[in-house]
Amino acid sequence: MKKILAALLASPILAGCALTPTPAPTNVAVVEEHQAAAQVDAQPQPAASPSVEPSPEPSPTPEPIDTTIGLRRPVFEDKPKPTLTPEQEEKYGACLETTVSNWSKGACATLLQEDLKELGFLVGKVETRIGVPAMNALLRYQRSREVRADGNAGPQTWYALASGRPARTTELPRECTEIPGVVLCVDQAHSTLTFVRDGVSEKVIDVRLGGWTSDAKTKKWRNFPTANGLWRVYNKHRNPSSPTYGEGVMPYSVMFDPNMYVHYSADFAKRGHARSSHGCVNVASKDDAKWIFENTPIEARVWVY
């Protein structure tokens, strides 16, 4: 395949975690045959007023990217429904063709929570209705089983649960191991960040990603996804200010999109995966966040998949 220059000089506002103005970074994850592919679950948000004092900007001219590595925007594809055993059919019954989501109640809502708890995604007790912890547990399960992560448990989710579909492999993709230099590999299926340098994994940490949370301004609840793709670190800040979230809430920010940073989160350290970010990659350990900050250079790649 021929080489192309990464030409996306502006990225849509996808999630709304950081909401800080910056020079538009380059998302270099698009190859020619996938340039028209839409980002799954991405919902644009309005840009905010300036708040971060930027570090020296990298060169605006991106390097050529070898597309034979297979860089792309992942596109969701429905998997065929598996054949269930009579026991599985009996257990899941009418739920197989039922959709439950936020604030749903009833037998299917209870069954969903019981399954998510048994699989380790739901922390806490099973509630009468689908609440915030269950919604974030559902989103994490959907990402792990390659089901559309929209927070709606419909037939695709139910058949994955009923058939015991295994989680996606933890093996690092080629985008992480064949790009020279530092790559922060963010695995949405397993909520991990792997720090890779010249193809060698040096550190793996637990992270929290976008999910079901309330808008800081409107207070309305919805899914704030973390966007997939290959990004370039264009700035870093030890303690950026945010007009939306205030001072000191995003220490050790490694910035790869105006609304998606890797940063320490005290809320993640306190509440774990019962809550979510607004699209950022949250780190629960301040020591880990500091280590990533200090070892990730400007121009490093961030591969979210």
Image (cartoon, rainbow, N blue to C red):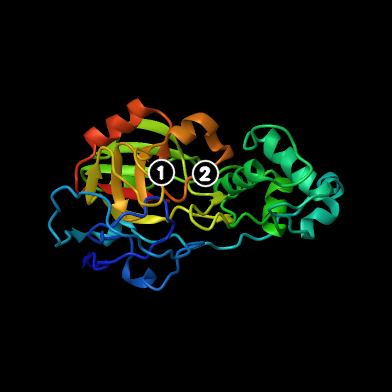
**How many discs appear?**
2
Q: Position of residue 173 (x, y in %)?
A: 39, 47
Residue placed under numbered mark 1 in the picture: 281
For badge 1, the amino acid type reads Val
Q: Is residue 80 left or right of residue 112?
A: left
| 240 or 260, nearer to the observer | 240
Please report the residue visible at 41 percent of the width from the left and 47 percent of the height from the top: 245
Instruction: Say above or below: 46 vs 194.
Output: below
Instruction: Say above or below: 11 vs 260.
Output: below
The Cα atoms of the two marked residues, 2 and 1, are separated by 10 Å
Name of the residue lying farthest toward the top: 287
Q: Is residue 101 left or right of residue 297?
A: right
Q: Position of residue 194 (x, y in %)?
A: 36, 37
- Mark 2 or mark 1, earlier in chain: 2
| Quarter of the figure that contains the N terminus | bottom left
| 185 or 233, nearer to the observer | 233
Q: Position of residue 140 (x, y in %)?
A: 57, 45
Please report the residue visible at 45 percent of the width from the left and 52 percent of the height from the top: 226
Instruction: Say above or below: 90 vs 205.
Output: below
The crowd level at tag 2 (other Cα within 10 Å; few <14, some 14-19, many 20+) is many
Q: Is residue 279 left or right of residue 241?
A: right
Residue placed under numbered mark 2 in the picture: 276
Image-quadrant location for residue 222:
bottom right
Please report the residue visible at 43 percent of the width from the left and 63 percent of the height from the top: 45
| 250 or 124, nearer to the observer | 250
